[in-house]
């Protein structure tokens, strides 16, 4: 696959450009931090929700697999379609805001699932993960638009590398943060997580 890709020569930096331009771009650093906060959402489906289903709901254990399947199928089927609508910085920022509010709705639904009868809990969880998947696709589309459109053409690798440091940091702290909020506090913790993701989306 890689051998069939066209070759593009690197673009020369403008005269007088210093190295490490991304590390001096304070607005992009702020975006990187906010996107890192928003990227906590990736661990919801793979970490917090499975443990929540197993320990805090009456849903059958196979729901852990079911929510992963719903998320995977939804993203595979619709991510490209969503991404086609997000191309500019303004559209990327709007998609980030939408993602934040969608995550708030999904987190609220997960919180409600605790204490419901078995099949009611299963239905609510499936709806919650479907909503979360919409937020995930909006977030991903926003990241692609913002990371490439905010970066100077000659320094895109620097900028994407910096952004991915924020993503890596999110993956590193997600178990501790989501464990403390969603599993340690419980239903209120899910609402706090939704509020945090919404705030990150609005701040972006």
Image (cartoon, rainbow, N blue to C red):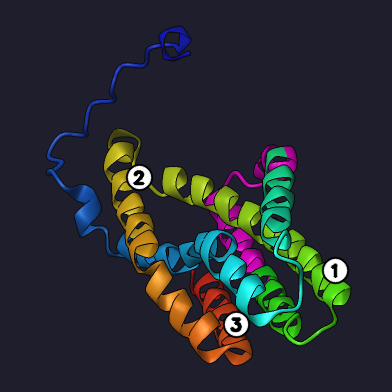
Nearer to us in this view, 127 or 145: 127
Nearer to us in this view, 23 or 68: 68
- Residue drawn where x is 59% and y is 61% of the image: 45
Rounded to the nearest angstrom, the CA distance separating label 3 from label 1 is 18 Å
Which of the 4 image quarters holds residue 187?
Answer: bottom right
Q: Give the range drawn in magenta.
A: 77-101
- Residue drawn where x is 54% and y is 70% of the image: 48
Q: Name the residue under label 2.
A: 160
* Element under disc 3: helix
Nearer to us in this view, 185 or 139: 185
Q: Name the residue under label 1.
A: 123
Task: Give the mark toward the camera: 1 or 2.
Answer: 1
Badge number at residue 26: none
Which of the 4 image quarters holds residue 161?
Answer: top left
Q: Residues within 10 Å of mark 3 (few under 14, many from 20)?
A: many
Label whose residue precedes the other's in the sequence (3 or 2) = 2
Q: Do the residues labelled 1 and 2 touch (CB within 8 Å)?
A: no
Residue 202 shows up from this direction: yes
Residue 32 shows up from this direction: no
- Residue drawn where x is 58% and y is 88% of the image: 186
Q: Name the residue under label 3.
A: 190
Rounded to the nearest angstrom, the CA distance separating label 3 from label 2 is 30 Å
């Amino acid at each position: 696959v890689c051998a069939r890709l066209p070759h593009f020569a690197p673009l020369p930096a403008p005269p007088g450009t210093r190295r490490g331009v991304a590390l001096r771009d304070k607005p992009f650093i702020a975006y990187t931090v906010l996107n890192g906060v928003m990227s906590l959402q990736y661990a919801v489906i793979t970490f917090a929700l499975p443990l929540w289903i197993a320990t805090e709901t009456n849903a059958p254990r196979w729901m852990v697999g079911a929510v992963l399947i719903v998320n995977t199928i939804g993203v595979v089927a619709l991510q490209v379609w969503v991404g086609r609508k997000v191309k500019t910085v303004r559209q990327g920022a709007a998609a980030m805001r939408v993602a934040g509010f969608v995550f708030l709705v999904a987190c609220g639904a997960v919180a409600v699932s605790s204490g419901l009868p078995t099949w009611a809990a299963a239905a609510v969880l499936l709806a919650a993960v479907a909503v979360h998947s919409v937020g995930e696709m909006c977030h991903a589309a926003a990241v692609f638009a913002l990371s490439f459109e905010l970066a100077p053409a000659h320094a895109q690798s620097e900028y994407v590398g910096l952004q991915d440091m924020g993503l890596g940091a999110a993956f590193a702290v997600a178990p501790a943060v989501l464990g403390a909020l969603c599993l340690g506090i419980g239903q209120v913790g899910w609402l706090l997580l939704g509020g945090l993701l919404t705030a990150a989306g609005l701040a972006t």
